[in-house]
Structure formats: structure tokens, C-alpha cells
Image (cartoon, rainbow, N blue to C red):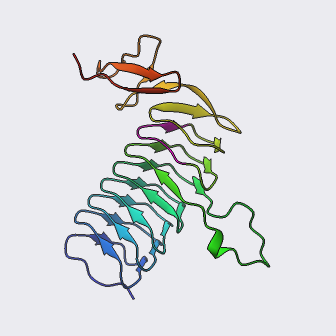
Amino acid sequence: MTKAFSKVYIHETSYIDDEVTIGDGTKVWHFSHILKNSNIGANCSLGQNVVVGPNVTVGNNVKIQNNVSIYEGITLEDDVFCGPSCVFTNVNNPRSEIVRKHEYRNTIVGKGATIGANATIICGNNLGKYCFIAAGSVVTKDVPPYALVMGNPAKQAGWISKAGGRLGSELICPIDGSVYKKVSPTCIEEDRSG
């Protein structure tokens, strides 16, 4: 039964289970379903045919495009973008005849991460903050913060800024001029010293 939320838009074809919280300003579009014990943050947009839960946490300002399912074991931090028809798994070796709900592997999608259309995230692999998963990629291992990955299996193809600009060797964002620095061969961070 879909209950009323005072500052939330829920399309009449969508279904919200009991024991769900949804933050102000969030919009849930056509044919979506939020299952019990899920928490959706403020100012989110859940597109057509989105399923969330049960027992899932979605941060604030998250955009989940059409045809995406966010299963138990997945956490989306603030400002995450899930492109159309991207896929999350939650069991590594599913079989129809074997119940493996006790084998869910957790996946945390870090703040500001982008997952492109039709990308697949294999369970148990975390996505670092502001990383960018190219459309159609298959993620089979953890992705560092600010990493740009693509392909099947996904491999790192460079670095990307918080604003979404591909970083060159100088690590300066072409969109907003922000500067990044290497803290190890496999990790960068925003340089706030200047």
C-alpha cells in the first residue's frame, strides 16, 4: 500500500511498502517499487521501473535512471548517478534452485560516483567517490576514487574530476580548473593547498 509523503512526488503507478522513509523533494516516477526497510534521501529522482530494496540506503541527491534495481546489500552514498539500465548483482554464484540470501555481498557506491548506462557492477566491489564507470562496462574489482574505468572487464583508463572532467597528466580539471594530486600510484585527491 502506498502511503502519503507530504513533500515527495510519487507517481500513481508506483508502490511504496510500509516501513520506508523518503526525504523531502524526492520524485518516484512510473512503475517503481520501494521495498520495506529502505531509506531514500532528499532530492532524489527515481526513474521509471526502478526497484529499491528491501533494506537499502540511498543518500541525498541521487539520480537513478530507468530500469535499475538496487538490491539488498547495495548502498548509494550522496550525489550518485545510476545511468539507464545499469545492473547491480548481490550474489556471486546464483542458482535458481539454491537459496543464497545469506551470501549477499555488499557494494558501496561512493559519494558523487557515476555509473553509465548498461554498466554491470559485480557484487562485493566498491566504487570510490567521484569515480566514473563508462557505459557498458563490467566492474569486477574495487574502483579507486576519481578513477575512470571502461571495458569488460573494466580497466582504469585515467582519472576524472569531481566536476566530471577527464584529467590529463597535469591533473587539472578542464571544466572548473580544480587541481588534483597523486597520493600514491593508484590514488589521487583534490589538492586544496592552493
Predominant secondary structure, magenta span: loop
One can see residue 173 in this view: no
The relative height of residue 59 versus residue 185 in the rendered view (above or below) is below
Splitting the image into 4 quarters, where does residue 69 fall?
bottom right
Splitting the image into 4 quarters, where does residue 45 fall?
bottom left
Q: Position of residue 99 (x, y in %)?
A: 71, 78
Q: Where is residue 23 in the image (x, y as percent from the top left)?
A: 26, 66
Which residue is pictured at 40% across the width and 64% down the height? 57
> Of all residues shown, which one is farthest toward the bottom?
1
Q: Where is residue 78 in the image (x, y as percent from the top left)?
A: 34, 51
The relative height of residue 67 versus residue 191 in the rendered view (above or below) is below
Foreground residue among 47 and 68 = 68
> Of all residues shown, which one is farthest toward the front?
184
Foreground residue among 153 and 85 = 153
Q: Quadrant of the C terminus?
A: top left
Which residue is pictured at 62% across the width and 34% down the height? 150
The relative height of residue 36 versus residue 66 in the rendered view (above or below) is below
In the image, is 103 to the left or to the right of 5?
Answer: right
The relative height of residue 178 versus residue 6 in the rendered view (above or below) is above
Which residue is pictured at 53% across the width and 48% down the height? 126
Which residue is pictured at 64% across the width and 52% down the height? 122
131 in the magenta segment:
yes
Which residues are the magenta region?
126-133
99 in the magenta segment:
no
Q: Where is residue 62 in the image (x, y as percent from the top left)?
A: 36, 54
Foreground residue among 171 and 62 = 171
Q: In which quarter of the image is the N terminus?
A: bottom left
In the image, is 45 to the left or to the right of 142?
Answer: left
One can see residue 154 in this view: yes
In the image, is 17 to the left or to the right of 153?
Answer: left
